[in-house]
Amino acid sequence: MNESMRRYMKVGLIHFMAYPAVGKGEGPIEETFKKIALDDYFEVAEITWIKDPQTRKNVKKIIDTAHLTVTYGAQPRLLTTGLNINDLDEAGRQRALATLKEGIDEAYEMGATAFAFLSGKYPEDRKEEAYQALVKSTRELCDYAKAKGSLNIALEVFDYDVDKKSLIGPVALAKRFAEEMRASCENFGLMVDLSHLPLLHETPEESLIPIKDYIIHAHMGNCVVKDPALPAYGDAHPRFGFPNGENDVEELVAYLRVLLSIGFLNKETRPVVSFEVKPFEDEDPDLVVANAKRVLNLAWDRV
């Protein structure tokens, strides 16, 4: 592509993945977030819960001063606590709903433009019940967010049989869910992730084209699925080019080409496309981020 990628998308970085020490809402949040804010490669930073009110204020000041766009990822609120938004136990579903509503409040406090979460595990023999629980929860989240402002709500599509084993899920079910939600919730959409496609056993065309009308956010990353015995197996988001990994420059090119062909990448709305990369073991987070930027630069030249 001869034109700048910035004409077609806002490049972002997921703060709590690049610097996983902050994933539980504590740790070196300000110091690591400032690194993103100082790097003008990124127009967007994706944050998660920040438990300390003063730290939230400090980060909000960095956001405003640096002219950053921010989105909110609530996945850690579920993944680090074991909560499940489609829990068939009503008390468990209500606990998950409560933490996500707290997250929506925090997203508004931080000036976020979008809020993302994921579906939970499900018993195969009660899959339809879990689906209906997810519909009920998501509709309540969308209504809650809409009552407070213009925050978009995105459900991220995860694997269903490898690692996270989330209900949504395979593309056919993701399409059914998105169609049903969008019919009553105009602030709802889907989030897709390159690193999840091999885990879903789907190509970019298979995974993205059927749900093209519902995608509002995209991630870029890598995974290892060849053998459970391999380092970083599953949904670990290792750097591009990681040994035995699935995604590098070539795969990112293919992903971006499909996103462009379906109109997701465009000059009018310039959607958010963020790196979801995580250092493996003792890798330097800043080097992992540099890797991602380098790979995207190479890939965009070939889109």
Image: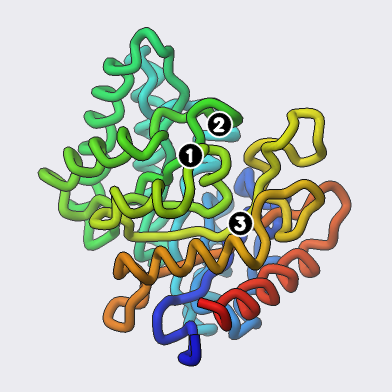
Query: Element under label 3?
Result: loop
Q: Is there a contact, CB below 8 Å, between mark 2 and mark 1? A: yes
Residue type pointed to by label 2: Lys
Residue identified by numbered label 2 = 164
Q: In the rendered image, which residue does mark 3 sit on?
A: 221
Question: SS for tag 1?
Answer: loop
Q: Which residue is mark 1?
A: 158
Query: Disc 1 versus disc 3: distance between alpha carbons?
Result: 13 Å
Q: Earlier in the sequence, mark 2 or mark 3?
A: 2
- Evaluate whether residue 153 shows in this view: no
User: Which of marks 3 and 1 precedes in the sequence?
Assistant: 1
Q: Residue at x 24, y 31 (%)?
A: 135
Residue drawn at (71%, 36%) of the image:
226
Callout 3 amino acid: Gly
- Name which quarter of the figure residue 7 lies in: bottom left
Position of residue 16 measured from the top left corner of the image (x, y, whole percent): 62, 55
Report whether residue 295 is seen: yes
User: Relative to residue 91, is residue 67 drawn left or right?
Assistant: right
Identified at 32% across, 56% down, the residue is 215
